[in-house]
Amino acid sequence: MKKTSLIIATALTLSANLVLAASENSGGLGDLQSSVLANTATINSNTNAINALSQVSHPATYDFKDYATTTVSTKVYKLQGDSFCGNTETRRIIPTSIGYDVERTRTGISVCHNKTFHYSADANSKSLISKDNNDMLGQTLSTDSLKKPVTLMTSNMTEGNAFGSATELFRGAARTGIFINTTTVLNAGTAKTPLQTFTDCIKVHTVRSSQSIGSFNRISWHCKGVGEVKRIQYEALTGSYRIWKLIDMH
């Protein structure tokens, strides 16, 4: 913006000089014509520079609300890399007064993973509040809570720019550690899953470090009106990889 203003000011100054030269010239028509040509060439050059600046591309920005689930209440994912808990994960999305909850269940021979994540969401951002650790019947055994909500996505995410925050982690009244989360939107594109190929998606890189709400390096695909459809994740604590791909939603 400063460069554009400088170019415009220069062009205006040259135009003023041109008028001044015309008023002071008492008969040197050839000199005046030369001055006109020189100043015109300079003004044209600066005009071209202004046009070039106006065409410079800027990083795209994305609103998390466009890439969140709207009408889907249940998603089923094919899960690779968790031999103990089977090869499917079901996520049930439950609206709340401040956002929504996501109940995640993995099933092997029987239910062996049942956790509920609590999120707040408004016009500006989506944040993680806490996680319930449930028994196989869905009854809460313990809750891991963040001292303050940590922002996971926002309404103004710029492609390539990382953002994040950190807070303390508690289980009941006991402090159990820290929670650090960093998010970067990499680009827009498509996401191929067994259910279908989604064409209007963003690819998100998340790095998280915590004692009880996951420590991982993740790439996930979030698609318009559907939310997350695919995830590839490196588990820092175990050194293993897991892959989630959407196979059903309703």
Image (cartoon, rainbow, N blue to C red):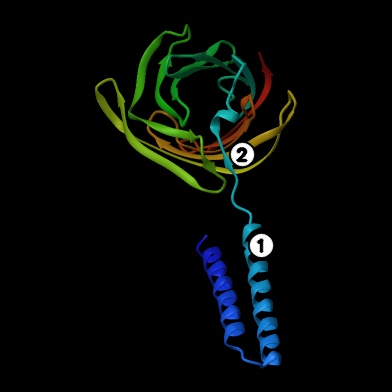
Indicate whether 132 appears above or below 190.
Answer: above
> Relative to the observer, which residue lies in front, 183 or 177?
183
Please name the amino acid that badge 2 sits on: Lys
Pointer 2 local density, CA inside 10 Å: few below 14, some 14–19, many at least 20: many
If the image is split into quadrants, where does the C terminus sit? top right
The residue at the far front in this view is 26
Q: N-terminal of the two: label 2 or label 1?
A: 1
For the residues labelled 2 and 1, the Cα–Cα distance comes to 32 Å
Residue 138, above or below 6: above
* Rendering coords of residue 154 (x, y %): 49, 35
**Residue sitting at 51 percent across and 35 percent down?**
155
Kindly indicate whether the residue at mark 1 contacts the one at mark 2 (C-beta within 8 angstroms).
no
Residue where numbered disc 2 is placed: 203
x, y percentage for residue 99?
A: 46, 20
- Is 138 situated left or right of 56 in this image? left
Q: Nearer the viewer, residue 62 or 26?
A: 26
Q: Residues within 10 Å of mark 1 (few under 14, many from 20)?
A: few
Q: Residue drawn at (44%, 11%), measured in percent from left and top?
A: 135
* Mark linked to residue 148: none
Secondary structure state at the residue bearing disc 1:
helix
Q: Secondary structure at mark 2?
A: strand
Picture quadrant where residue 196 is located: top right
Q: Residue 153's spot in the image, x, y percent?
A: 49, 34
Residue of label 1: 51
Residue 9: where, in percent of width, then height?
53, 69
Q: Hey, which residue is sitting farthest left in the picture?
A: 173
